[in-house]
């Protein structure tokens, strides 16, 4: 885990160094996250199909069948969680009338 954090910090250093404002950093991090999301969904889908293949080709080996079931179950759980979060974010965005690509201007406080 230490290595992952260290490598991530090393790879993200140029992001912070070359950013003009905090908004640029937030936009760039959002772009990175938007690239990672489809990759994570694809990995979960591949895991499900890997478990399915392992289950189908077990042919009497109960340990391999159980392994395949576990892999399929966790693949479905991962897909369900990711799609559910996607849906919750969509419902929140529709509720507050937030369109993709628009900026939200916060209300201003008047000082008397």
Image (cartoon, rainbow, N blue to C red):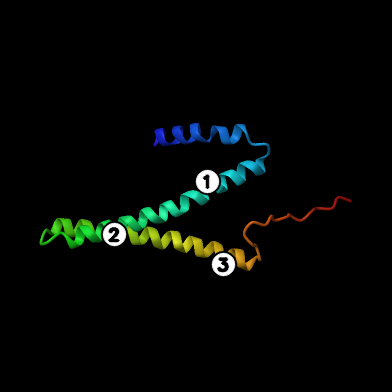
Residue 58, quarter of the rendered image: bottom left
Q: Marks 1 and 2, how far apart in space?
A: 26 Å
The image shows residue 91, relative to residue 54, as above or below, that is below
Left or right of 69: which side holds 96? right
Q: Which residue is mark 3?
A: 91
Q: Earlier in the sequence, mark 2 or mark 3?
A: 2
Q: Earlier in the sequence, mark 1 or mark 2?
A: 1
Farthest residue, direction left: 60
Residue 83, quarter of the rendered image: bottom left
Q: Residue visible at 22% across and 59% down?
A: 53
Farthest residue, direction right: 112
Q: Which residue is mark 2?
A: 49
Dot 3 falls on a residue whose secondary structure is helix
Query: If the image is split into quadrants, where does the N terminus sit?
Result: top left
Q: Marks 2 and 3, how far apart in space?
A: 30 Å
Q: How many marks?
A: 3
Q: Position of residue 93 (x, y in %)?
A: 60, 63
**Foreground: 11 or 93?**
11
Circle number at residue 60: none
The image shows residue 10, relative to residue 86, as above or below, that is above
Viewer can see residue 6: yes
- State if disc 1 and disc 3 touch (CB < 8 Å): no
Q: Position of residue 109 (x, y in %)?
A: 80, 53
Q: Residues within 10 Å of mark 3 (few under 14, many from 20)?
A: few
Dot 1 falls on a residue whose secondary structure is helix
Q: Earlier in the sequence, mark 3 or mark 1?
A: 1
**Foreground: 109 or 49?**
49
Q: Which residue is mark 1?
A: 32
Q: Marks 3 and 1, how far apart in space?
A: 23 Å
Left or right of 15: which side holds 112? right
């Amino acid at each position: 885990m230490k290595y992952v954090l260290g490598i991530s910090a090393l790879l993200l250093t140029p992001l912070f160094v070359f950013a003009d404002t905090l908004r640029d950093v937030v936009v760039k991090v959002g772009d990175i996250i938007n690239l990672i999301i489809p990759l994570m969904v694809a990995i979960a889908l591949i895991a499900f199909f890997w478990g399915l293949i392992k289950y189908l080709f077990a042919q009497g080996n109960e340990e391999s069948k159980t392994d395949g079931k576990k892999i399929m179950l966790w693949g479905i759980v991962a897909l369900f969680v990711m799609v559910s979060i996607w849906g919750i974010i969509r419902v929140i965005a529709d509720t507050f009338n937030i369109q993709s690509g628009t900026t939200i201007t916060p209300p201003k406080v008047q000082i008397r």
